[in-house]
Image (cartoon, helix red, strand yellow):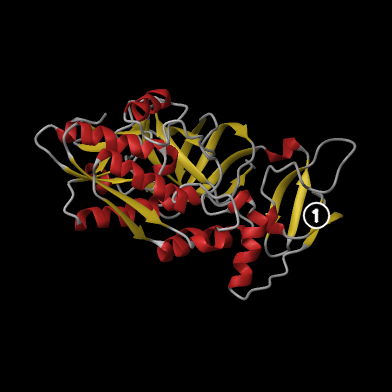
Amino acid sequence: METGKLKTRKKRVVVALSGGVDSSVAAALLKEEGHEVIGISMQLYDQSKLEDTRFDSCCSLKEVDVARRVAQILEIPYYVLNFEDVFQDKVVNYFVDEYLKGRTPNPCVRCNTDVKFHHLIRKARELNADYLATGHYVRNLYNETLGEYELLKAKDRQKDQSYFLFGTDPKELPFLLFPLGDLTKPEVRAIAQKYNLPNAHKAESMEICFIPSNNYKAFIQEHLEEKGENLDTGGEIISEDGSSIGKHEGYHHYTIGQRKGLGISNPAHPLYVLDVNQSSKTVTVGSEDKLYMDGLIVQNVNWLRQPSSPNIHLKIRHSQTEIEASLEQAGDSQTFKVYFHKPHKSVCPGQAAVFYEDETLLGGGWIDRGFHKK
């Protein structure tokens, strides 16, 4: 646990409680150390629309109830704050808009940056808290050589969540605590069991929190209907030479690298989505080897720490192994060309590109497009 910030005296710490075991254990550890802990949950979406579905993901009513029970067990004050409007604006609208642009969004990163940290930090300061703590698996350590805090990968590399936090404002790092950074998931569950927390053995959900049954297609359609929009997104599925080989009901149902659910087949080789074009409403498909790119363009880069050299390690998916690459500034100060040392496949516009140097999270940005060397 990050103890360096907490050595001097009892602190007031606001903990973001999602109802999951991780944030609950973060609160328990801080309470155990003798700090004044305040639990806060966020109401992010209109729960009444989800009453007919199984919906027990992060920040749902069921999870808020679990968080309230955890707060009672730990004997800490607990509040639920309504962030529906900002979540709708910063996450839901963004999610739908990106798909309608033919891009693949990453709502979890947006939520962490634009909702959880930005607004919870403000609320924590309104409560005169010394720190905001979350249950993320990441380490926030002071680098004495640089004279600043930096984010490092978690001890449990299988659970490391640094990828989702590249958009964090580096000026806020001194205010943030991540008590689980040096723990493994089994250790966290054991602590939860020690405190008899109701979520000690709760299974983890991999679904996006605001989409019932993980049905993107139905969610986007309902969202458009609520806004009074009836977009015609159907069009042609085309081969690399531009010839039509099928029809689709909406280009926003496809993402680069997708193989299943195309509704077409090729006896010679499997077909993969190579491109999604909003303006022509076309979905281009082809062989797997055509997915490989030599690099990508990344925009709106946020740096937590400047790299010591152009050579970095890169992730373009949370669960993937790191890619060796080199950076080159392109245009403005927030746009970079990333050159892979070896070709890599499934570069999806709209996804996050996150940079590392050894264990340190350097920063990251948003993929505009992949490219081939000329």
The structure residue drawn at horizontal position 47% and vertical position 60%, both measured from the top left corner, is: 45
Q: How many marks?
A: 1
Say whether residue 17 is visible.
Answer: no
Label 1: few (<14), some (14–19) or many (≥20) C-alpha neighbours in 10 Å:
many
| Image x and y of residue 233, in percent | 72, 65
| Image x and y of residue 52, in percent | 60, 57
| Image quadrant assignment for residue 291 | top right
Instruction: Name the kind of residue labelled 1 in the image.
Output: Ile
Q: Hey, which residue is sitting farthest left in the picture? A: 8
Q: Is residue 104 left or right of residue 123?
A: right
The structure residue drawn at horizontal position 73% and vertical position 60%, both measured from the top left corner, is: 250
Q: Hey, which residue is sitting farthest right in the picture? A: 267
Q: Is residue 190 left or right of residue 341?
A: left
Nearer to me, 12 or 295? 12
Q: Secondary structure at mark 1?
A: strand
| Image quadrant assignment for residue 27 | top left
The structure residue drawn at horizontal position 77% and vertical position 46%, both measured from the top left corner, is: 261
Please say if 148 is above or below 185. below
| Image x and y of residue 241, in percent | 82, 51
Please say if 315 is above or below 226. above
Please say if 62 is above or below 200. below
| Image x and y of residue 68, in percent | 34, 47
Say whether residue 113 is visible.
Answer: yes
Quarter of the picture holding the N terminus: top left
Q: Which residue is mark 1?
A: 237
Quarter of the picture holding the C terminus: top right
Nearer to me, 225 or 251? 225
Q: Is residue 211 left or right of residue 290?
A: left
Please say if 119 is above or below 142. below
